[in-house]
Structures are given as C-alpha cells and as structure tokens.
C-alpha cells in the first residue's frame, strides 16, 4: 500500500506560480511511475504529468510549456512546478502512483486545491 500526501496548493493570482509536493510512504524508486492529475468542478479528472522510475516524463500537451514534474528520491517526494497559472488551472490536484506499469495509477492522495484568480 502506497500512501501519498499532497501539499502546496492555495490561492494565486493569474500569472503566478505554485509548486505542489507529494510525499510517498514508499521509496519512489520502487514505484513504476508517479503522476499528477487534476479535477475541476463539474469536470472529469484529467492527466497533468507523470514521471517513470527511469526518469522519463510525460505531460498533457497543453500544459508541458508551463508545468514541470520532478522528484527528490532522498525525500520520497515528487513535485509539480506550475508557472504562468491561468484561472482555468483551478482544480483539485491529485498525486498518484503506479506500482505496476506506467499508467496503472491505483494509489491516490487526498488532493490539494489550487485556485487561480484574475
């Protein structure tokens, strides 16, 4: 069982930046992939970014120029750096882990709210 705890959300003005953190209860190098997803009110959860154990990254095409996923193995933490934030980035952001395969995200954090104001 992998437990994930997100932090770093909050209220930010459009154009600002935030960095989300996700601390894993398990060594992140023992997990096949770590990812970030988001869900806006009334919308389905959508993929934001992911990083495999080998360090390969993947992004939602519309976010790759503004968002960056990274990790700190010593802290078992995955980060999501978000720049040039827009009101449409407002959502609950979730961290997820896949222990088998690169897309089988079956461990989820509780989410952290990001609100971008005009």
Image (spheres, grey):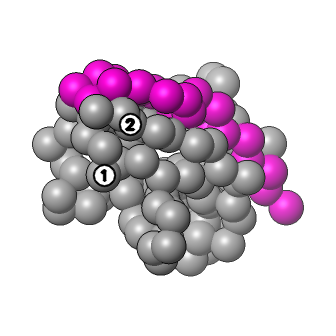
* x then y, percent, for residue 12: 41, 25
Q: Is residue 44 left or right of residue 86?
A: right
Q: Quadrant of the N terminus?
A: bottom right
Q: Does the segment drawn in magenta span residue 6?
A: yes
Q: Which mark is residue 116?
A: 2
Residue at 78% x, 56% y is 2
Question: Between disc 1 and disc 2, whose residue precedes?
Answer: 1
What residue span does the magenta drawing correspond to? 1-22
* x then y, percent, for residue 73: 58, 30
Q: Secondary structure at mark 2?
A: strand
Q: Quadrant of the C terminus?
A: top left
Q: Is residue 101 above or below residue 59?
A: below
Q: Which mark is residue 50?
A: none
Q: Nearer the viewer, residue 76 or 63?
A: 63
Q: Nearer the viewer, residue 114 or 105?
A: 114
Residues at marks 1 and 2 touching, judged by CB atoms closer than 8 Å: yes
Q: Which mark is residue 88?
A: 1
Q: Is residue 23 left or right of residue 98?
A: right
């Amino acid at each position: 069982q992998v437990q994930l705890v997100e932090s770093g959300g909050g209220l930010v003005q459009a154009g600002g930046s935030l960095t989300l953190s996700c601390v894993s209860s398990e060594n992140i190098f023992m997990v096949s992939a770590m990812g970030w997803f988001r869900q806006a009110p009334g919308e389905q959860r959508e993929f934001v970014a992911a990083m495999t154990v080998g360090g390969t990254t993947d992004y939602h095409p519309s976010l790759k120029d503004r968002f960056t996923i990274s990790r700190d193995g010593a802290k078992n933490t995955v980060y999501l750096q978000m720049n040039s934030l827009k009101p449409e980035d407002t959502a609950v952001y979730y961290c997820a882990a896949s222990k088998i395969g690169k897309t089988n995200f079956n461990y989820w954090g509780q989410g952290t709210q990001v609100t971008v104001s005009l």
